[in-house]
Image (cartoon, rainbow, N blue to C red):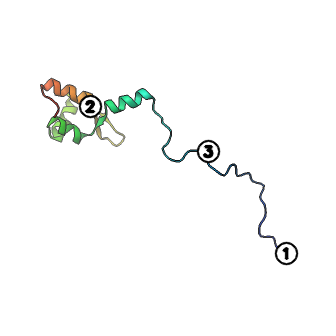
Amino acid sequence: MPVEFQQHLPIDLGPSRSSRRVGRPPLTETRDEIIHRLMDPDLTLHETAAILSLSKATLRRYTDRGKLPCRRTAGGQRRFKLSEVLVLLEQRGEEAR
């Protein structure tokens, strides 16, 4: 009895081309959210310390005392909004360099 190696399977594989575009994932932010994020970005501790001409330790003390608000990432890193850093600069009577 001969063995047939290739058998047709009753499976519909769909169209040969993928209907999903390859490349960038779809946007999850609204237009206003994108503009706000780009106009008022989050800054790292290092970037904020450089803008304020402070050491990182001093900047940590500022946040601990409430002089500069920050948010924490899931890993515990401090993040600062540019607008809040600029407000602190104005209060100190300085210009951003």
Q: Which image quarter holds the N terminus? A: bottom right
- Looking at marks 1 and 3 on the same chain, the residue that comes earlier in the sequence is marked by 1
Q: In this view, does 20 lie above or below 51?
A: below
- Looking at marks 3 and 2 on the same chain, the residue that comes earlier in the sequence is marked by 3
Quadrant hosting residue 77: top left
Quadrant hosting residue 70: top left
Q: Mark 2 points at which residue?
A: 82
What residue type is disc 1 on?
A: Pro
**Front position in the image: 75 or 88:** 88
Residues tagged 1 and 3 counted as in contact (Cβ below 8 A): no
**Front position in the image: 49 or 28:** 28
What residue type is disc 3 on?
A: Ser
* Mark toward the viewer: 3 or 2: 3
- What mark, if any, has residue 19 been given in the picture? 3
Residues tagged 3 and 2 counted as in contact (Cβ below 8 A): no
Q: Would you say residue 65 is visible in this rendering? A: yes
Image location (x, y in percent) of residue 64:
22, 33
**Front position in the image: 82 or 45:** 82
Q: Which image quarter holds the C terminus? A: top left
Outermost right residue = 1
- Residue at 74% in and 51% down: 12
Task: Measure how far apart labels 3 and 2 are at the Cα level.
Answer: 41 Å
- Looking at marks 1 and 2 on the same chain, the residue that comes earlier in the sequence is marked by 1
How many neighbours does mark 2 have within 10 angstroms: few (below 14), some (14-19), or many (20 or more)? some
Q: Mark 1 points at which residue?
A: 2
